[in-house]
């Protein structure tokens, strides 16, 4: 009775409950000890996920509020000049880029535990595509990148390799003097 009742009460919102261990050390007792240990591992794995979700929500809240505020202020007055609309759109664009970067970072963090996945990716074609995609960002900062990558394959998914290289190039563009 106690075992079933306690087991049905254990939920994501109440993961601290454990099944009472009987005084006897029979097979049922050992099974309950094993189940409780498994519940301990599950509970400890939920903690970083909750923290990650809370941090992500907090990080996303600020740029979303800035975008909404810029749009609301701009729409409040009807007689805006083209320069005022351009200024508002520039602010929205900057915050959207920030949101895009945050979402990429969150995806990278979320997938970090997954590892490189199975597959094969050709390094030079991935690098060429990333440099092509980022050329406008590099042009804006007057940066040039010479690619000298041999046509070799690596044992990882193309998606994983793309995320890693894009993150490296993006940081290089962002933080290059």
Image (cartoon, rainbow, N blue to C red):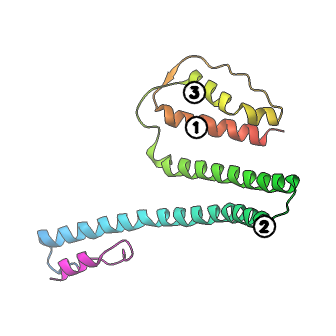
At x 83% / y 32%, what residue is drawn?
A: 142
Q: Is residue 8 above or below residue 85?
A: below
Q: CA distance from mark 3 to mark 1?
A: 10 Å
Q: Where, by quadrant of the figure, is residue 172 drawn?
A: top right
The mark found on residue 126 in the picture is 3
Q: Where, by quadrant of the figure, is residue 80 drawn?
A: bottom right
Of 95 and 155, the residue lying toward us: 95
Find residue 155 and report its horizontal and vertical position in percent.
45, 28
The mark found on residue 45 in the picture is none
The boundaries of the magenta stretch are 1-20
Question: For the N terminus, which image quadrant?
Answer: bottom left
- Please, what secondary structure does the residue beneath circle 2 have? helix
Q: CA distance from mark 1 to mark 2?
A: 39 Å
Question: For the C terminus, which image quadrant?
Answer: top right
Find residue 42 and report its horizontal and vertical position in percent.
36, 64
Q: Secondary structure of the magenta portion, mostly? A: loop
């Amino acid at each position: 009775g106690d075992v079933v009742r306690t087991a049905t009460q254990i939920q994501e919102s109440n993961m601290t409950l454990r099944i009472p261990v009987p005084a006897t050390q029979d097979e049922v007792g050992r099974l309950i000890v094993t189940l409780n240990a498994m519940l301990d591992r599950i509970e400890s794995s939920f903690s970083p996920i909750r923290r990650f979700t809370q941090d992500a929500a907090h990080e996303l809240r600020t740029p979303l509020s800035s975008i909404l505020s810029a749009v609301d202020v701009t729409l409040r007055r009807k007689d805006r000049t083209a320069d005022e609309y351009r200024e508002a759109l520039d602010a929205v664009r900057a915050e959207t880029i920030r949101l895009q970067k945050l979402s990429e970072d969150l995806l990278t963090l979320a997938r970090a535990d997954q590892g490189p996945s199975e597959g094969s990716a050709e390094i030079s074609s991935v690098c060429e595509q990333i440099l092509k995609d980022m050329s406008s960002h590099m042009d804006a900062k007057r940066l040039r990148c010479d690619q000298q990558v041999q046509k070799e394959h690596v044992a990882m998914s193309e998606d994983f390799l793309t995320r890693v290289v894009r993150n490296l190039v993006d940081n290089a563009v962002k933080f290059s003097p």
